[in-house]
Image: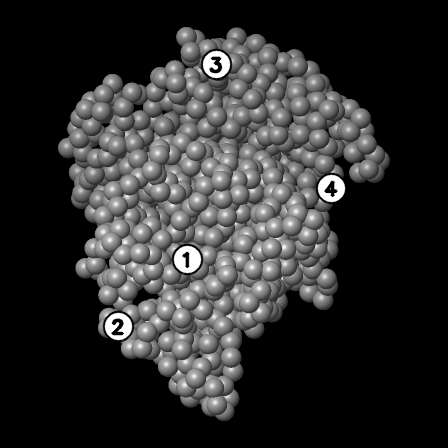
């Protein structure tokens, strides 16, 4: 039988999608572990009938089947070489919720947060809540017996399961429950024949996840087949539906953050807090905490949450905890926003822990061992000693109240010696955990990472019993073979083994990854924060995934495809891959992942790199020439003084339609109007002899301000000068002699030998279309022109956030061999930053108006908006701007085929915030793309903050417009 035959049979048998294509397979080679397996294909079943049909076809051909949820498993159990079942596409619904019975009926692909949202209006919630709650699925949680931070209060997923509907490998449909309900034939006999071993062979601790939970089948425990099935990692049957128990959520919560001198002290204190009935007792050390986070003094912290019927009661319980704890310092937070901000620090640790403080890589594998909580302090000391003995580093964090520790360790999983050390350490750590009475897994399951070592925890006879239980459920070893029983070696199938051993020849410098593109790509560890279906707060990542719901349009999906491109299988065409190109096509280059991804994946840069190689020596899409070379075309329009003619032609529908077709522009888009007078021309016209005093700032005439919205530049000059600053434009001549550097040097230097005329440009449009050779040339010319500014040390104010981000981040990474690039990047400042730093005593006009709009995605990701928030507050502009991305994103939203996704991105946050704004609200949008999107989709005018302040100055002084 060929793969094509299997695919054809599956297509004939199921109603859901069947994908044996390169992209479908490449997207599911990995989960969030160190392991990689290339599947034959992927099926997205629509219902239990489809699941049964897949099992029947695969059983007939001896092809393994692997159930998969959100793909965030950390031990390798969501990978396989056969057919992967993806439940997130169709079997992802909440079927029923009974508030009186406190139960819910869910499908396996339902994301946990969707259940929590439905239960919240009834004062209920699902107890377990892993840090991946915004993307992990209930099926995956049941498969791994997941826990989360609230397990000290509400236990593991197994504690919250009532009934499970399961299809066995041989097609039997069972409803599992207590009293042997749904038990396959032979299971009861197996248990009753070995009761003594089952009663004595399992360690007693709250986080024992390793192995099969056969002890749940003991008569004194209710012979609970559903509970026993939890944590079986897809090896016993395929879950199709579950009845789960909900718990009452506290009406109010408080968060006590307790500071300790070190992690050992925090670990010793954790178990002593349990008698107070906390909801959480989480621990983490300073290495995982961003420096900007405001935490109490200390080098390690416990996050202890308390609940109550009122905020006062919750706070009182938290303060009682603080008084009982021996702490260096403490903080009690009762407001919801403050608690969310602190919890995000803890939840992001699964990603931030993948980098050591010096930037080197760290990996899972021994991510969640658990010991009795009272043993946590001694265990951590021994664990640290073992790390030191092997020359390894790691920063523990996690569920201290349950004795469960997460840690990423700087294993070398690339060289043969490094892999041997990984094995030796794993074997010795398993012995250490067992010596402390612990479990090899306390949350994420055994998978391939730990299953080989289960005999050290349980003994060979118990493991043999596990194997017999597997044979009762799955006699053909069809379901997820190589996991839990008869496991693959823990040092095989490592995902790094297939990557190139030598650095790939690339254009960008990748300074954070040692110049190695492979290292940059393997930053993605699969925690899938990019797969959230709603953007929370100011977050941006990943707008294209939220618009399409497709894995290939998530940051993780694209990183996976790049990984497989470097591996050469299943993506075989390298830089010429159409699969990678198509996945990157809907990347908006918003840079949201650069800041929102816990490990700092920078897909905008990777996309530019890929397009550079993909189109090398080949004809590019028309949009790359039309919009990638936009600065050139607009400069010619200005030189010819043809703005009026261009605008007139663009207003003729037939001509505009033809022009858009030729330029690869979406038919739904209106072409922006070119300003009749450029900003620079206005600047030279309005200047008077002599200059004002004050500190010099160089105002960057970006392409958009220069040619399309010069009113923003004029307003910025008005405000900067009102603040007492002296404004100049960058030089336009490159020469051997020192230029004046104020943008008015032509007459004085035109006859100097070696003079060359030019305009500065950040190269943004070339970068976003991957025309990196052209971008390099433009940026080197810019650096030549800016040399006198760099020598003078003058700050460079950039009004367009995307251009500022390109200069601050892309410039030094692309021209990493030119020291001037870093110097210019360091001089770049935003409009608000310039006013705050250079005119700290200036008071903006008092406007006292509400604002709405959106923080530019590049500003959020690269520049930050703290100064903007303070400037708005000083001017009496109240309200917060939304997060997300406007969806236009430079050339993206104008390109043919992108309009619907562009519109969907705008409809997520930006357009709704504008529609509900009260009359008189100022619509702020510092980016030209954002303003264009607002105008074309909502019919409203967005304004740059500079424009709003300039109008305020005019009103205050009674002057006409500048």
> Which is nearer the N-term, disc 3 or disc 2?
3
Mark 4 residue element: loop
| Front in this rendered view, residue 109 or 501 | 109
Residue depicted at 72% across the width and 62% down the height:
619
Report the disc number at residue 734: none
Q: Residues within 10 Å of mark 1 (few under 14, many from 20)?
A: many
Which image quadrant for residue 877?
Answer: top left
Residue 361 versus residue 921: which sits nearer the camera? 921
Badge 1 or badge 4: first in the primary sequence = 4
Numbered marks: total: 4
**Extreme left residue here?**
323
Mark 3 residue element: strand
Which quarter shows the N terminus?
top right
Q: What residue sits right under mark 4 in the picture?
A: 21
Discs 4/2, front? 2
Of the pair 688 and 470, the residue shown nearer to us = 688
N-terminal-most mark, 4 or 2: 4
Judging by the rendered image, the residue that carries numbered circle 3 is 97
- Mark 3 and mark 1 residues within 8 Å of each other at the beta carbon: no
| Residue at the spot of label 2 | 692
- The correct choice, above or below, for 784 with respect to 11 in the image is below
Q: How packed is label 4: few (under 14 Cα within 10 Å), some, or many (20 or more)?
A: few
């Amino acid at each position: 039988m060929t793969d094509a035959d299997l695919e054809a049979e599956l297509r004939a048998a199921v109603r859901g999608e069947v994908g044996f294509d390169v992209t479908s397979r490449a997207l599911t080679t990995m989960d969030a572990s160190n392991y990689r397996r290339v599947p034959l294909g992927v099926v997205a079943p629509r219902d239990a009938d489809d699941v049964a049909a897949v099992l029947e076809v695969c059983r007939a051909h001896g092809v393994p089947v692997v159930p998969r949820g959100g793909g965030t498993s950390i031990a390798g159990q969501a990978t396989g070489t056969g057919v992967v079942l993806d439940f997130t596409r169709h079997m992802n619904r909440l079927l029923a919720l009974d508030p009186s019975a406190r139960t819910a009926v869910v499908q396996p692909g339902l994301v946990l947060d969707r259940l929590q949202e439905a239960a919240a209006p009834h004062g209920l919630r699902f107890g377990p809540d892993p840090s991946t709650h915004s993307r992990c699925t209930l099926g995956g949680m049941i498969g791994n017996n997941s826990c989360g931070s609230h397990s000290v209060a509400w236990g593991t997923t197994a504690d919250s399961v009532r009934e499970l509907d399961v299809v066995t490998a041989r097609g039997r449909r069972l409803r599992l429950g207590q009293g042997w309900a749904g038990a396959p034939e032979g299971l009861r006999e197996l248990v009753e024949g070995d009761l003594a071993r089952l009663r004595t062979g399992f360690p007693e601790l709250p986080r024992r996840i390793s192995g099969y939970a056969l002890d749940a089948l003991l008569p004194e425990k209710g012979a609970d087949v559903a509970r026993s099935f939890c944590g079986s990692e897809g090896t016993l049957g395929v879950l199709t539906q579950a009845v789960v128990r909900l718990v009452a959520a506290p009406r109010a919560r408080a968060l006590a953050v307790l500071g300790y001198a070190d992690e050992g002290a925090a670990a010793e204190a954790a178990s002593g807090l349990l008698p107070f009935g906390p909801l959480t007792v989480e621990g983490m050390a300073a290495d995982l905490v961003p420096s900007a986070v405001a935490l109490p003094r200390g080098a390690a912290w416990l996050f202890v949450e308390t609940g109550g019927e009122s905020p006062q009661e919750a706070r009182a319980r938290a303060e009682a905890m603080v008084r009982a704890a021996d702490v260096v310092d403490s903080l009690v937070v009762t407001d919801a926003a403050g608690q969310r901000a602190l919890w995000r620090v803890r939840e992001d640790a699964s990603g931030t822990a993948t980098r050591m403080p010096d930037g080197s890589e760290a990996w899972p594998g021994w991510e969640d061992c658990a010991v009795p909580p009272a043993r946590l302090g001694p265990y951590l000391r021994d664990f640290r000693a073992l790390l030191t003995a092997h020359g390894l580093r790691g920063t523990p964090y996690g569920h201290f109240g349950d004795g469960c520790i997460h840690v990423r360790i700087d294993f070398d999983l690339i060289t043969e010696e490094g892999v041997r050390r990984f094995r030796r350490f794993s074997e010795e750590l398993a012995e250490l955990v067992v010596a402390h009475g612990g479990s090899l897994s306390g949350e994420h399951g055994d998978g391939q990472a730990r299953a080989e070592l289960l005999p050290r925890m349980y003994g060979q006879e118990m493991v043999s019993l596990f194997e017999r239980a597997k044979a009762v459920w799955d006699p053909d070893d069809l379901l997820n073979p190589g996991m839990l029983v008869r496991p693959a070696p823990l040092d095989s199938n490592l995902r790094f083994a297939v990557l190139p051993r030598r650095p790939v020849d690339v254009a960008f410098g990748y300074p954070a990854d040692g110049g190695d593109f492979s290292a940059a790509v393997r930053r993605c560890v699969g925690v899938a924060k990019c797969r959230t279906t709603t953007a929370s707060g100011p977050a941006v990542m990943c707008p294209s995934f939220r618009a399409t719901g497709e894995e290939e349009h998530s940051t993780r999906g694209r990183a996976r495809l790049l990984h497989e491109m470097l591996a050469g299988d299943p993506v075989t065409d390298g830089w010429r891959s159409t699969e990678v190109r198509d996945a990157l096509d809907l990347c908006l280059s918003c840079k949201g992942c650069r800041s929102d991804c816990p490990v700092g994946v920078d897909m905008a840069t990777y996309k530019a790199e890929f397009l550079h190689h993909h189109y090398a020596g080949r004809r590019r899409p028309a949009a790359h020439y039309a919009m990638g070379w936009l600065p050139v075309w607009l400069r010619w329009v200005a030189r010819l003084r043809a703005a009026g003619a261009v605008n007139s032609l663009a207003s003729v529908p037939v001509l505009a339609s033809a022009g858009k077709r030729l330029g690869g522009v979406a038919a739904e888009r209106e072409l922006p109007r070119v300003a009749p007078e450029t900003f620079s021309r206005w600047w030279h016209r309005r200047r008077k002899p002599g200059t004002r005093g004050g500190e010099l700032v160089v105002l960057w005439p970006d392409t958009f301000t220069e040619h399309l919205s010069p009113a923003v530049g004029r307003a910025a000059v008005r405000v900067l000068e009102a603040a007492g600053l002296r404004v100049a434009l960058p030089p336009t001549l490159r020469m051997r002699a020192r230029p004046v550097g104020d943008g008015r040097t032509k007459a004085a230097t035109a006859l100097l030998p070696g003079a060359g005329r030019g305009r500065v440009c950040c190269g943004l449009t070339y970068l976003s279309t991957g025309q990196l050779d052209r971008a390099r040339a433009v940026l080197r010319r810019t650096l030549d022109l800016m040399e006198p500014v760099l020598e003078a040390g003058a700050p460079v104010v950039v009004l367009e956030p995307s251009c500022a981000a390109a200069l601050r981040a892309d410039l030094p990474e692309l021209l990493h061999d030119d020291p001037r690039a870093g110097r210019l990047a360091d001089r770049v400042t935003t409009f608000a930053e310039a006013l705050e730093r250079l005119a700290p005593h200036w008071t903006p006009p008092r406007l006292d108006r509400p604002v709405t709009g959106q923080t530019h995605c590049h500003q959020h990701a690269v520049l930050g908006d703290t100064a903007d928030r303070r400037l708005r507050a000083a001017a009496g502009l109240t309200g917060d701007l939304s997060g997300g991305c406007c969806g236009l994103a430079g050339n993206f939203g104008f390109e043919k085929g992108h309009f619907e996704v562009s519109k969907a991105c705008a409809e997520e946050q930006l357009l709704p915030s504008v529609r509900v704004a009260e009359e008189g609200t100022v619509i702020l949008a510092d980016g030209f793309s954002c303003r264009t999107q607002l105008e074309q989709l909502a019919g409203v005018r967005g304004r740059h903050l500079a424009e709003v302040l300039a109008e305020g100055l005019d009103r205050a002084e009674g002057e006409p417009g500048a």
